[in-house]
Amino acid sequence: MPLLVFATITAQPDAESELRKGLLELVQQVRTEPACQLYELYESTEHPQRFIMHERWDDEAGLQAHNQMPHMKEFGEKAQNWLAGPAVLTKVEV
């Protein structure tokens, strides 16, 4: 069953630019994953430090495989200094 994920990602003060750049690079890599149907990045117009990732996966197993990809681990290491906290996820089965 397809799975939608909405990830709200918040940058630390003055780290918005670095986070944006890192997320845009990540988007290009994630879109090549076999289970990825959609991976779109949005930026809040009201809160410039807030980003929203809209994702669609073949299923929960595809999402779990995504979380184990080397580029996700690499991004996690780089983003430690950019993130105000962990991403807030909302999952919806379609």
Image (cartoon, rainbow, N blue to C red):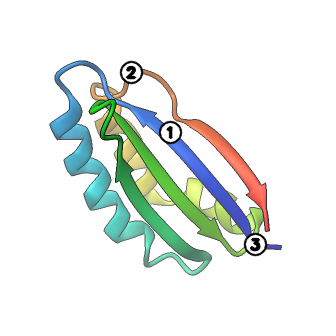
Relative image position of residue 59 (x, y in whole percent) = 75, 69
Q: Amino acid at mark 1?
A: Thr
Residue 52 to residue 78: above or below: below
Q: Amino acid at mark 3?
A: Pro
Q: Looking at the image, which residue is at 65% across and 69% down?
A: 57
User: Of the numbered discs in the image, which one, if any, rests on residue 8?
Assistant: 1
Q: Looking at the image, which residue is at 67% across and 61% down?
A: 4
Q: Amino acid at mark 2?
A: Ala
Relative image position of residue 36 (x, y in whole percent) = 56, 74
Residue 10 to residue 93: above or below: above
Q: CA distance from mark 2 to mark 3?
A: 30 Å
Position of 22 with respect to 92 (left or right) is left
Q: Are marks 3 and 1 in contact (CB under 8 Å)?
A: no
Residue 56 to residue 25: above or below: below
Q: Earlier in the sequence, mark 3 or mark 1?
A: 3
Q: Are marks 2 and 3 in contact (CB under 8 Å)?
A: no
Please state, as top left, top right, bottom left or bottom right, where the N terminus lies in the image: bottom right
Q: Callout 3: few (<14), some (14-19), or many (20+) C-alpha neighbours within 10 Å?
A: some
Mark 3 = which residue? 2
Q: Are marks 2 and 1 in contact (CB under 8 Å)?
A: no
Q: Callout 2: few (<14), some (14-19), or many (20+) C-alpha neighbours within 10 Å?
A: some
Relative image position of residue 11 (x, y in whole percent) = 32, 28
